[in-house]
Amino acid sequence: MKRYIFLLLAGLALVGWNVRDKTVDKKKKETQEFPSEIVDFKPYDGNPVFKATGDTATWDEQIRERGFILKEDKTYYMWYCGYTKKTGKEIKYLGLATSPDGLKWTRFPNNPIHKKTWVEDMFVLKSAGTYYMFAESKDDIARLLTSKDKINWDDKGALDIRLKNGKPISKGPFGTPAVWKEGDTWYLFYERNDSDVWLATSKDMKVWTNVQDEPVLNSGPETYDKFAVAFNQVIKYKGLYYAYYHASAFKDWHEWTTNVAVSKDLIHWKKYDKNPILKGNKSSGFTVNDGKEFRFYTMHPEVNVYFH
């Protein structure tokens, strides 16, 4: 009898250790896939660091959607979308602000810097001395603009996105463009009606072809992104790709969250088990490497910064 009890207790102990080992392994794998320094952020005490004027006499009485920040040398450059309540349904303009530390911002004196076309929800990438801005225009149609000085932008027109067989995608909105470049290939992530995210590639940025005609990231079945998803930024860190995306758990999109997913190939994405990484209607978020660590900015409905 004693021998039986001993064996039983030993067996239970082994089961317990096995369960604990699996739990430890799972946590270790999760930490490796989603390192703390790129998913765990705390709000800056001085938030918000930038916001709309709230003054009906200014062109940026309101700001909205995704702006974008690049750090070059000792200066942070932020492009943002401004409008007035009165004219917001007609056009939204592009503005620029600069900062020595990413915390205290100064509006460019000649704002808005681009008034020829509606510009919002922008993403900026520098390549070979040229700045490429992928942005939404009216009716949520993605466009490309280029610049040499970050101020004067040349509108190249709407993006030409094709199905895998080369035929144009169906009519309708295609927006929130987020771009990654690797080698001589450009990778464009775009949403349609904010319901799912597709991936298209290009060598010349004149024609973009879907990698597959199915989304690479779907909304749901998780509750937090059940009704809307859109990529804000893709980065590569320790050999893996990370997509920061905003999402909504509500059909009317009255509240947004910021989330993250990981991939080995830019096509197959795994959502973070602990999403959302930011709640409270803080959205359109992306990372900026300040030279020491990643900091995180959210742009909508005001600009907030978070530190690890």
Image (cartoon, helix red, strand yellow):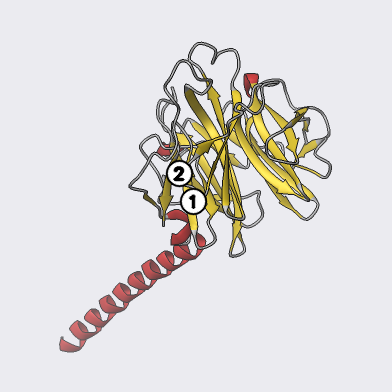
* Residue shown at the point (27%, 78%) measured from the top left: 13
* Residue shown at the point (35%, 44%) measured from the top left: 46
Q: Residue furthest bottom?
A: 3
Q: CA distance from mark 2 to mark 1?
A: 7 Å
Q: Nearer the viewer, residue 221 or 254?
A: 254
Find numbered disc 2 in the image and state the secondary structure of the residue it sits on: loop
Residue 54 position, x and y percent, is 42, 22
Residue 303 position, x and y percent, is 45, 38
Q: Label 1: how many residues lie within 10 Å, few (<14), some (14-19) or many (20+)?
A: few
The residue wearing badge 2 is: 104
Where on the picture, by quarter, is residue 52?
A: top left
User: CB under 8 Å between callouts 2 and 1?
Assistant: yes
Q: Amino acid at mark 2?
A: Lys
What quarter of the picture does the C terminus occupy?
bottom left
Q: Is residue 45 left or right of residue 170?
A: left
Where on the picture, by quarter, is residue 114?
A: top right
* Residue shown at the point (83%, 33%) measured from the top left: 166
Q: Amino acid at mark 1?
A: Asp
Q: Residue furthest left?
A: 2
What quarter of the picture does the N terminus occupy?
bottom left
The vertical placement of 228 against 264, above or below, is above
